[in-house]
Image (spheres, rainbow, N blue to C red):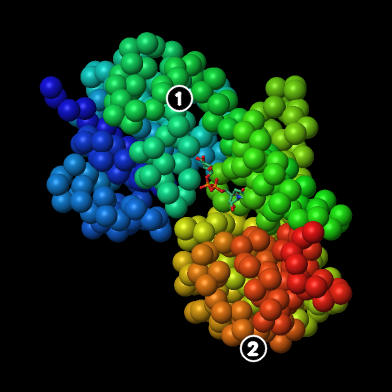
Amino acid sequence: MHRAKIAILGTGYVGTANAVGFAELGYDVIGFDTDARRIAGLRLGIPPYREEGLGEPLARHLRNGRLTFVTDLAAAVEDAAFIIIAVGTPSRPDGSADLSHLDAAVESLRQIATDRPKIVVLRSTVPAGTSDRIAAQLPAHYQLLFCPEFLREGSAVWDFLHPDSTIVGAESDHAAGAYAGLVRSLNAPVMVTGRRDAELIKGGANAFLALKISFANEIANLCGTLNADALNVLQGIGADRRIGEAYLEPGIGFGGPCFEKDVQSLEHVARNSGSPSHLLQATLRVNDAQPRKVVDILEEELGDLRGAHIGVWGLAFKAGTDDLRSSLALRILDDLHARGATATAYDPAIESAELPGRTSIARSAMEAAHADALLVLTEWPEFCDVDPSVLAARLRRRIVVDGRNVLDGERFARCGLRYRGVGRSAVPDSDGAAAVGA
Ligand code: UDX
């Protein structure tokens, strides 16, 4: 039987992971982007972003010819039975989704359409109702599906190959069946719904995960006030299988290009539809306030931040990526600057970046630690391997504020450092005792 060909429009995180993922499933895939530099890099096997597990299959499928990359849209879609749209849908200042890239892609598709039928699969995250609008703009012999993705940066190809489920938003059984067939070898349960339901499944799933994080942060802040240990409390809460332990890690709040944007977009849709969501608004408010909490802790410890120099470990919005989009570390650097402190930052994935408050970038964790105090903002595993006695010799005021709760506070305290986490007691405490929490 003839193998289905797949064209992918957009080579960002979602598009590239889909391109490599479908090639891994054995399909011939053509990736398209208007960004000629990115396509030139991809043709050479250079991933457009840092991603564990992407470089090797990308190179392999370029060599075996399953993957090609082009800047010519007509060439990309000519023989494709499926056209996957994975262009960016960023936030506008009012929280609504900016669909201009999507509209441009659909208009280009319309202009070059031939009379061969195609299945178009929208995988960009969009507000409810968008797919129906797009479907009406496509030629009548094109069928549109909305199939959300649940990929996390840093593990996107693995996530593509191991989904918990495949959601197919369809208005036609034929197109739904064809897509279900395409991903059969993933062995994940397939749920076919209407397109609008599928759009709300994606928005609702991201919003619920974000809500869990904001909940964890509120509970952690309460633990901090009441002298309880947030890690114990949240582990205990998450042990109930009805709740689950995932996405209950307190810290500096959720960052990255998806959660904030998607919650804002759903909140905007809810408000405009006449049923505003108090929970979504609260999720965003808690997240806006959380980065300030770690700077408050630092200020509590140092007394005054004016004139202080802070070492910062971590800039990326999470470990495993070099992505600075909506990274709360940037907001924290802004806040440090506003409160009169200067900073030097180190992130193993970031060599250069324009940072708020003229923050300089160090080439190692220890170089950044020539400071009054240390602030940990990304949970890179290498930070846990640092020898606290070497750190103690560098840090002038010997204060470590761990915005991700990843370091071993008691070990740090034994080396003469004062350790503060999020929602945890200080170690050593004011009486000099070294236990974390009660
Ligand atoms: C997210 C969704 O997980 C994914 O399904 C969707 O397709 C895209 O958005 P991603 O943004 O890559 O993925 O990262 P994720 O690992 O979900 O983390 C998002 C943010 O939440 C990060 O800043 C992370 O540090 C933070 N987070 C996550 C917490 O603060 N606590 C947690 O318990 C989990």
Q: Secondary structure at mark 2?
A: helix
Crowd rating for badge 1 (residues with CA inside 10 Å; few <14, some 14–19, many 20+): many
- Mark 1 or mark 2, whichever is nearer to me: 2
Q: Quadrant of residue 308?
A: bottom right
The residue located at (21%, 36%) in the rendering is 26
Q: Amino acid type of disc 2?
A: Ala
Instruction: Please state which of residues 26 and 230 is positioned toward the viewer in this rendering.
Output: 230
Q: Amino acid type of disc 1?
A: Ile
Task: Please give left or right for residue 170 compared with residue 313 in the image.
Answer: left
Q: Quadrant of residue 86?
A: top left
Report whether the residue tagged 1 is closer than 8 Å to ligand 1.
no
Q: Which residue is mark 1?
A: 167
Residue 251 location (% of width, % of height): 68, 56
Residue 24 location (% of width, % of height): 26, 40
Task: Look at the picture and state if 152 lies above or below 144.
Answer: below
Query: In whole angstroms, how far apart are the C-alphas of marks 1 and 2?
Result: 54 Å
The residue located at (47%, 72%) in the rendering is 351
Instruction: Please state which of residues 31 and 399 is positioned toward the viewer in this rendering.
Output: 399
Res. 348 in view: yes
Residue 111 location (% of width, % of height): 33, 28
Crowd rating for badge 2 (residues with CA inside 10 Å; few <14, some 14–19, many 20+): some
Which disc number belongs to residue 203? none
Q: Quadrant of residue 414?
A: bottom right
Which disc number belongs to residue 393? 2
Q: Quadrant of the C terminus?
A: bottom right
Q: Secondary structure at mark 1?
A: strand
The residue located at (40%, 55%) in the rendering is 51
